[in-house]
């Protein structure tokens, strides 16, 4: 896949993500304190995410945030992904995420560990700013040690500069 | 088992592609190995496979003839061509130009047989002759002599005895003695390298930390892991390696005894635990930890495990390495924007910038005299090994590698050579290069992707 195709694909996915998320991310009216909630009754669609949404929701199914070369700034097109995962963290206080930070192969391996951590921290901060709790989040940097693509080309490097959102508890 | 996974460095006279095209099936390799064990001739053929890649002219290299050293015993001849190992070592250093065997019109094996005019006509400055004898119990005794051709004078006459499996060690020690006698600098051929190999793809990746002879022979796996391994660092006595492993899910640092396999987890803080480096006295370990939120340089007292924080900056501070006297720690930091090399007193104090040329300098390795610093230097998409030499005062820079993604330089303990990692054809390979960049040798391993080389200290103290 050449880089322009990839960029196009990412943009399309982002648009799809925005469309998919807009409903859920929108500020919900504060839920009325249910007078006597029946504990066994399945919760109706009150706008909250449930664990099954991780498999079905178009936004939540996106778990990778990509970065520019030597950068740890979160790009605007990934705000929607961050927003829906932050909402999930709010909706499911028992859920936990590990943010796995990665770098491309260029430069020193030890330095790239630092770069991977910075990227993980950038997503961590964005998730917390959007309402996720620090206690739900952990950052692990793999540096350049776990590439998803192993060719020495710009399109490969772009796929490797990433943070993977990994749910360790749903 | 080890041999099955890691055969000695392969024929690399050909292109990397044809190297990879060699038979790789395990059964075939076993067969090949067995043949090597049984037929000495084949083993010799394999030894000849090491590539010596002479780059540029080498006017000041000293001409030396290392005459074949025949086996004069009554049993099984040794598999190792001792004279060839010596010859290859000396050639690889960049300091010597070795005479090809086919040009040796005479083959003396002892001083009395030498016709000096012949060697003067061949324009040789030095001559090494010797022979291999039986030493009982399957061992061998190598007797060798070094001569100054112009002065018709013997400079060295030594004998070494060893068991059959240690004949390469004997040859490397002979090369060390010859190197030192002629140049006045201790040889570093009888040393080792540590490196990491990765094989497989995706979820089936396997990593191994390997220790081999300095020429890539005799690889031994120290530790295997399904999770990434990196940053091996030698203890100053050469007995232990510190390294980073992801086997616990996050990075952590272990120190492992090479001979016994015993190991200790020394650092597994929250965040990054990386880039260990032993102090010259072996009592401390410098490392990079992000427990405070971003990577900082610390020094750990290995007895008490107490940590002293050396840097405090929001930039990435990593890859600490000690000066030979232990007074200074060099490290990589991007506090100025891009990664550059800085130094800080190992007892604490202000950090000062060391490298000012090139917009990306990382992974410093310091020569034993402290006057040369080699780094991985980036420019655009190209990363090469660059050497900053301050021997003559103002630093002079030279580029000593030719790849596009070269990294992890590591000085030999005598400062005469470096080893580094390069990428070729989608895999990592190792190169040894003389510090003057004149001679470069590729060490190609049969399997996997090789990276993170670290040159050992000397194997015997003085």
Image (tube, helix red, strand yellow):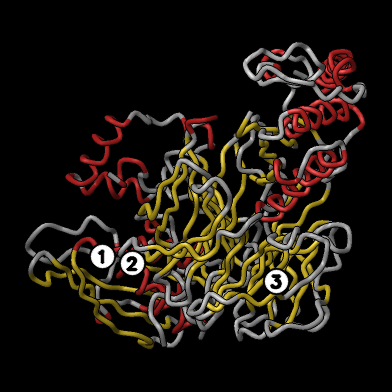
Q: Is residue B86 left or right of residue B161?
A: right
Label 2 to label 1, Cα distance in Å?
21 Å
Q: Dot 2: within a 10 Å radius of its alpha carbon, few (fewer than 14), some, or many (20 or more) residues?
A: many
Residue A105 percent across, percent down from the top left: 69, 42
Q: Mark 1 or mark 3: which is in front?
A: 3
Residue B289 shows in the view: yes
Is B343 or A12 nearer to us in this picture? A12
Q: Residue B271's quadrant in the figure?
A: bottom right
* Residue B431 pos. (x, y %): 56, 54
Q: Residue at x 65, y 62 (%)?
A: B437
Chain that bears disc 1: B
Which mark is drawn over residue B166? 1
* Mark 3 residue element: strand
Compared across the picture, whether B335 is left or right of B202 comes to right
Mark 3 or mark 2: name the one nearer the start of the chain: 2
| Quadrant in the picture for the C terminus of chain B | bottom left
Circles 3 and 2 on the same subunit: yes
Q: Nearer the viewer, mark 3 or mark 2?
A: 3
- Give the labeled residue for mark 2: B67
Relative to B285, does residue B53 appear above or below in the rendering? above
Q: At 18% across and 67% down in the image, what residue appears?
A: B163
Q: Is residue A155 visible?
A: no
Give whichever of A101, A26 is nearer the camera: A26
Which disc is residue B373 wearing? 3
Crowdedness near tag 3: few (<14), some (14–19) or many (≥20) residues, C-alpha within 10 Å: many
Q: Is residue B152 above or below residue B211?
A: below
Query: Counting residues from the N terminus, which is met first, the one under dot 1 or under dot 3?
Result: 1
């Amino acid at each position: 896949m050449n880089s322009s195709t990839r960029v196009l694909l990412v943009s399309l996915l982002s648009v799809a993500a925005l469309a998919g998320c807009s409903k859920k991310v929108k500020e919900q009216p504060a839920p009325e304190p249910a007078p006597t909630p029946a504990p066994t009754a399945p919760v109706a669609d009150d706008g909250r995410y449930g664990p099954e949404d991780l498999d079905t929701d178009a936004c939540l199914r996106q778990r990778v945030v990509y970065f520019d070369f030597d950068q740890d700034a979160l790009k605007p097109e990934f705000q929607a992904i961050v927003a829906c995962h932050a909402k999930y963290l709010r909706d499911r206080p028992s859920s936990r995420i590990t943010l796995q930070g990665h770098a491309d192969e260029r430069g020193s391996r030890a330095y790239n560990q630092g770069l991977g951590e910075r990227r993980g921290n950038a997503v961590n901060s964005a998730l917390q700013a959007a309402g996720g709790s620090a206690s739900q989040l952990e950052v692990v940097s793999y540096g350049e040690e776990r590439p998803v693509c192993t060719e020495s080309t710009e399109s490969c490097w772009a796929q490797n500069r990433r943070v993977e959102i990994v749910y360790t508890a749903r | 088992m080890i041999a099955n996974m890691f055969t000695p460095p392969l024929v690399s006279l050909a292109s990397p592609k044809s190297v990879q095209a060699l038979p790789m099936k395990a059964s075939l390799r076993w067969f090949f190995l067995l043949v090597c064990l049984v037929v000495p001739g084949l083993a010799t053929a394999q030894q000849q496979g090491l590539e010596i890649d002479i780059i540029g002219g080498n006017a000041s290299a000293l001409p030396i003839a290392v005459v074949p050293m025949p086996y004069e015993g009554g049993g099984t001849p040794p598999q190792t061509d001792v004279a060839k190992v010596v010859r290859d070592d000396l050639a690889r250093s960049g300091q010597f130009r070795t005479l090809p065997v086919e040009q040796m019109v005479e083959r003396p094996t002892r001083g009395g047989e030498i016709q000096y005019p012949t060697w003067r006509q061949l324009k040789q400055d030095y001559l090494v002759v010797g022979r291999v004898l039986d030493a009982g119990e399957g061992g061998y005794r190598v007797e060798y002599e070094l001569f100054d051709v112009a002065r018709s004078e013997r400079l060295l006459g030594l004998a070494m005895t060893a068991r059959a499996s240690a004949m390469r060690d004997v040859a490397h020690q002979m090369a060390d003695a010859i190197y030192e006698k002629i140049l006045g600098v201790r040889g570093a051929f009888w040393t080792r390298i540590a490196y990491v190999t990765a094989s497989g793809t995706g979820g089936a990746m396997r990593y191994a930390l390997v220790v081999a002879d300095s020429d890539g022979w005799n690889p031994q796996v120290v530790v295997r892991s399904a999770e990434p391994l990196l940053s091996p660092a030698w203890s100053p006595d050469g007995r232990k390696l510190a390294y980073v492993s992801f086997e616990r899910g996050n990075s952590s640092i272990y120190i492992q005894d090479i001979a016994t396999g015993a190991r200790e987890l020394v650092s597994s803080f929250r965040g990054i635990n990386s880039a260990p480096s032993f102090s010259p006295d072996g009592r401390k370990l410098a490392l990079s930890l992000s427990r405070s939120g971003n990577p900082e340089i610390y020094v750990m007292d290995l007895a008490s495990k107490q940590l002293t924080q050396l840097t405090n900056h929001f930039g990435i501070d990593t890859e600490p390495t000690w000066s030979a006297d232990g007074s200074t720690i060099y490290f990589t930091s991007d506090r100025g924007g891009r990664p550059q090399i800085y130094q800080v007193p190992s007892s604490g104090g202000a950090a000062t910038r060391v490298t000012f040329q090139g917009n990306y300098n990382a992974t410093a390795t310091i020569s034993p005299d402290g006057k040369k610093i080699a780094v991985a230097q980036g420019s655009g998409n190209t990363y090469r090994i660059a050497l900053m030499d301050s021997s003559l005062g103002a630093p002079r820079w030279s580029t000593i590698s030719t790849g596009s993604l070269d990294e992890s330089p590591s000085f030999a303990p005598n400062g005469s050579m470096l080893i580094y990692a390069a990428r070729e054809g989608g895999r990592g390979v190792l190169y040894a290069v003389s510090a003057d960049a004149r001679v470069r040798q590729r060490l190609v391993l049969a399997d996997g992707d090789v990276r993170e080389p670290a040159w050992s200290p000397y194997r015997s103290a003085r």
